[in-house]
Amino acid sequence: MLRRDAVLLSILKKEIVPATGCTEPVAVAYSTAIARQRLDGVIEKLEILVDGGLYKNGMRVGIPGIKERGLEMAGALGLFAGSPERDLQVIEDISVEALNKAKELVEQGKVKVSVKENCNNLYIETILYTSKGKICVVTKDRHLNAAVSDNEENQMKCESKQAESDKSSEAIQNYSLEDFLDFSQTIPIDELSLLEQGVNMNLGLAKEGLAMEAGIAKKFEKLVKSGLMHEDLMYRAQLLCAAASEARMAGSKLAAMSSAGSGNHGITVFLTNYAVAEKMGLSRESLLRALALSNLVTFYIKSYTGTLSAMCGCGVAAGIGASVGVVYLLGGSSKEMLGAIINMIGSIAGIICDGGKEGCSYKLALSAGWAVQSALLSMAGAVANNKDGILSSDFKEVIRNMGYVCNPGMVETNNAIIKVMTNEI
């Protein structure tokens, strides 16, 4: 296997993993589960310090299988129900006893979550106090990049091990769109079986969302029956992505196959491509190769925008990745793939992320539908002027431009969003 292929395949396997629940509260539960695993005794209090982006995403999103929400509850559940060896499925199994203990700890005011100021990257600092002492666990940059600190004097300076995904981010920037395309076309199809699992997992969530009587998917279906919408490629992608996202963010116990640390990114990439392949009657192999390409483009974009940001990653990362996959499925060229990317960035770059919640389903519907349309427009010869705004005719440059606008450009936007959500204005 070529070195390039080995590197890209390794990145695919690291960045595409099952996740039960929204990955931000899950990352908090993962951190607290590690702390509890390392320190027993009677729990006295739990302090959790997080970056603003993670705080924003964890405020109102559902926790799998229960009605309670919030980072306090997620942190407490990590103590009593957490299995850190299960990674992003750390709190997949919550017993009644564990839930009651977590609720009691929160109700007693023993769990405190606060925001770390001037922190623009993913960050979690967990300090657990028990009758046998205290322990600090710090997560930096990626959801599972957690390590125990031995710094007893100044917890704010806790350092963690270097994230493997940081190395992945550096590695993926060495490659081009043509590299991603060539890899996806030539890698042995058996190496991509994980992607088929991702389709099936995310379709399971979509099925659950389609059964939600008050959900967005049911309303889409009614609009089609009324003749106000048509059952085309865009509609099918919107329907599946919105349904799966709404079920997941409401607290479904089903796992999503995530992409680049996000279940909703995974839903956008996997189900947009699936919808097109399904409607067009395309082969399994074509779908899996399109998914490999889509995911690699998504990872590439996230390496510039960061794990969490003020921009909705489902639109400006996963949606863009999906648009490239759609062009591939429809037999388009690398030039037309770049055109789809330019169309996406030239239209929906800047759409804000205002936290994880059921309403994300509307943003996934927008992202999935426009991903298909951007691809179709590019293949029809309609591409936004690459001299406009932040656009460029170069793959690396246009992504780098958007990444710069995202961070540091929209750092204050992110702070403003958090202030609005926390009623501080």
Image (spheres, rainbow, N blue to C red):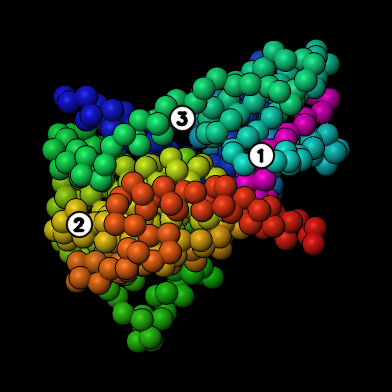
Location of residue 157 (image quadrant):
top right
Name the spot of residue 336 as percent of width and height, x first: 21, 60
Q: Point out the tag, 3 or 1, that comes first from the N-terminus.
A: 1
Q: Residue 119 has which mark?
A: 1
The single residue placed furthest to the bottom in the displayed view is: 227
Identify residue type, mark 3: Asp
Q: Is residue 131 above or below residue 121?
A: above
Under mark 1, the amino acid is Cys
Q: Residue furthest front?
A: 387
Mark 3 vs mark 2, CA separation in Å: 29 Å
**Which of the marked residues, 1 or 2, is nearer the chain's N terminus?**
1
Q: Is residue 220 above or below residue 399?
A: below
Q: CA distance from mark 1 to mark 2?
A: 38 Å
Disc 2 target residue:
335
Instruction: Check residue 49 for magenta coloring.
Output: yes
Q: Which residue is mark 3?
A: 166
Residue 143 placement, left or right of 422: left
